[in-house]
Image (spheres, rainbow, N blue to C red):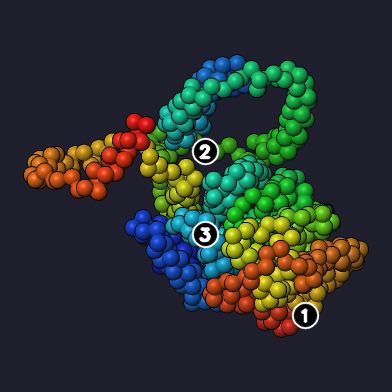
Amino acid sequence: MGFEKLLFYIFAAVTLFAASMVITRRNPVLSALYLVMAFVSSAALWLLLEAEFLGIVLILVYVGAVMVLFLFVVMMLNIDVATLRARFIHYLPLGLIVAGIMVFDMFLVLGPADFGLDQFAKPQSQPADYNNTAALGQILYTTYLYQFEIAAVILLVAIVAAIRLTLRHRPETKYQDPSNQVRVRKGSDRVRLITMPAEPVPPSLTATLGATHTEMTE
Amino acid sequence: MPVEANSMIAILPEIVILTVACAVLVIDLYLPDERKDINHIVTIIGLATALGAISLIGSDKVTYAFDNSFIRDPLSDLLKGVILIVTLFTFVYSRDYMQQRQLWIGEYHVLILFAVLGMLIMVSANNFLTLYLGLELLALCLYALVAFDRDSKAGAEAAMKYFVLGALGSGMLLYGISMLYGASGGFFGFAQIADIAAAQGTDNQLLVFGLVFVLIGVAFKFGAVPFHMWLPDVYQGAPMPIVLFLSSAPKVAAFAMAVRILIEGLGGLQTDWGEILIILSVLSFVLGNVVAIAQTNIKRMLAYSTISHVGFIFLGLLAGTAAGYTAAMFYTVVYALMAAGAFGILVLLSTQGIEAEQLDDLKGLSERNGWLAAMMALIMFSMAGVPPAVGFMAKLLVLEAAVSVGLVWLAVLAVIFSIVGAFYYLRVIKLMYFDKPQLEQPLVIDGTATIAISINGLAILFLGLFPASLLQVCGVAFG
């Protein structure tokens, strides 16, 4: 128990440190990397709570996917941080006062009076072979089937909406289509040889050609 | 718990809508541009089938499904029916408009159908999780629909505002839900929270805290003052058929959300939320009616008019009696019909090469198309609350509910401001009948749309003359 408590305080301190670094760094790339650190240490906190599935998902999804995407965006967009932060110190006292009031308010409502150990008993710890990923899957596909399906529909809508709002067909853009390229068959598709007799130039065409020619020389 | 066949029958309308939406999504890929009408036909048939499914499984008995996360009762049957009917009107009115602007593509149908699905889920939600998911499904579709005309700067701006403020509203709601989850000791079903609320009442500080946040979320979705800022800008920037959809059906879903949360979930705290609703209601009908007078853009004017109607809907809810709830529901249904009709006419007006956005565009409508002007006049009279149009009946019922619980001052105030509001509705009628038209050529609209607008307009008159049938159905919902 004592060791777990120590671990909790270490990871909690790391999380707080990383979180404060996220908002104080000038370089957005550094901020993003500190955010990764905050996620990793909060994943460790989940593990201490025996919620290993959430811990792993936090690392896989947030650190592995979301943050990498985020880093790409930060590096590709040239964000002018200086102007964003120009008034940071100026507004800091006001921000601190507002934040202080909010923390105080939240403590009144969310504090030990409503959420203390006497209100909610400490949950029993599960045996070592308990698999909460399996338990989660179990209820996700039975009790929460309806909600699970709705969530799937929401993701589908996100795809449809994103494509509608951003996809534009631009016929003037030249690009290679690999799937068409590999479908080319030997012989007729690659080169087409035509035999045709040389045609005499019709007199009307010679007249026009001649006219253009004279115009150009003039 | 294994899924039972009963559960599947209970969600039949939802299944129909989801299937149709997916079908249109796929069919659209194979349709050449000139045959996009097939999407329209499939969608209309799908909506009609869903209506049929509702009447098929409808009964006075309440059914639960999926571990009590789904509820089907008379309330949900009626509201789902209204949502589907209003959506049918939306599609019929918007056909020419969208075709002329090259927006008549599959995604338009798909996104609206998914929005309808989200609303059906909200109406039938029996716990906070389902309700929230339905709400998010609806909201996501609406954000995309507002920006549907992606070359329009106003549309993109409106969608951005809607997205940011909508996300804020959802965040508030979610925060409130998590408070209620904590306060009830880990439940999010409406029935369990109702038990806790009845037993502990205001002694449970956390419950009241959660209530306030949830209420802010509801007010955001309704667009009640002071959470109304998004409404006029979104109405102004979005394409007209989207505004038609946005202003009608989602209000019905928002009403269902309010009923499920406030009455079924937190009925034990009625005195608390009743007082908050009084403030929201007064602010809404005062600000809505007064600011609407100053508008020259008819979309903005109708947006403020929406805000004032929301004030009246709250007036019925805050009474806290079955009669009050019935009156509020009657008002919501009637409002959805009126909004669909009013914006429907604007959509039809906009098919003649102009965007009918300014009040001046309505000038002399009676000379250009007498029947359309008559329908618009009827709807405006109804919104102003002039008998025999149904708007009068709806206002009368909510006022009666407020008076019956001793809130006479509130009813008097509401009457005063609805008289103030009558000014801008009557101004529309004056413009249509007594002013010279700016465009001389007569306004010709296609047959289906004429039939639809006639049904819509005459329904308002019919319900005004014979309100008993709809009132009885609304009454059954609140037993």
Towards the viewer: B18 or B66: B18
- The alpha-carbon separation of the residues under discs 2 and 1 comes to 66 Å
Chain name for mark 1:
B
Which residue was labeled with disc 2? A124
Chain name for mark 2:
A
SS of the residue under disc 3: helix
Q: Please state if B270 lies on the left or on the right of A174 as rendered.
A: right
Name which residue lies at 65% across and 22% down.
Answer: A84
Image x and y of residue B102, in percent: 49, 55
Is B51 placed above or below B259 here?
below
Which residue was labeled with disc 3? B100
- The alpha-carbon separation of the residues under discs 2 and 3 comes to 65 Å
Chain name for mark 3:
B
Kindly tell me whether residue B75 is visible in this rendering: no
Image x and y of residue B97, in percent: 55, 61
Q: Quadrant of residue B431?
A: bottom right
Given contact means CB atoms under 8 Å apart, are the residues at marks 3 and 1 in contact? no
Q: Quadrant of residue B342?
A: bottom right
Which is more N-terminal, label 1 or label 3?
A: 3
Which residue was labeled with disc 1? B388
Name which residue lies at 73% across and 50% down.
Answer: B228
Towards the viewer: B409 or B476: B409
Q: Please state if A162 lies on the left or on the right of A114 as rendered.
A: left
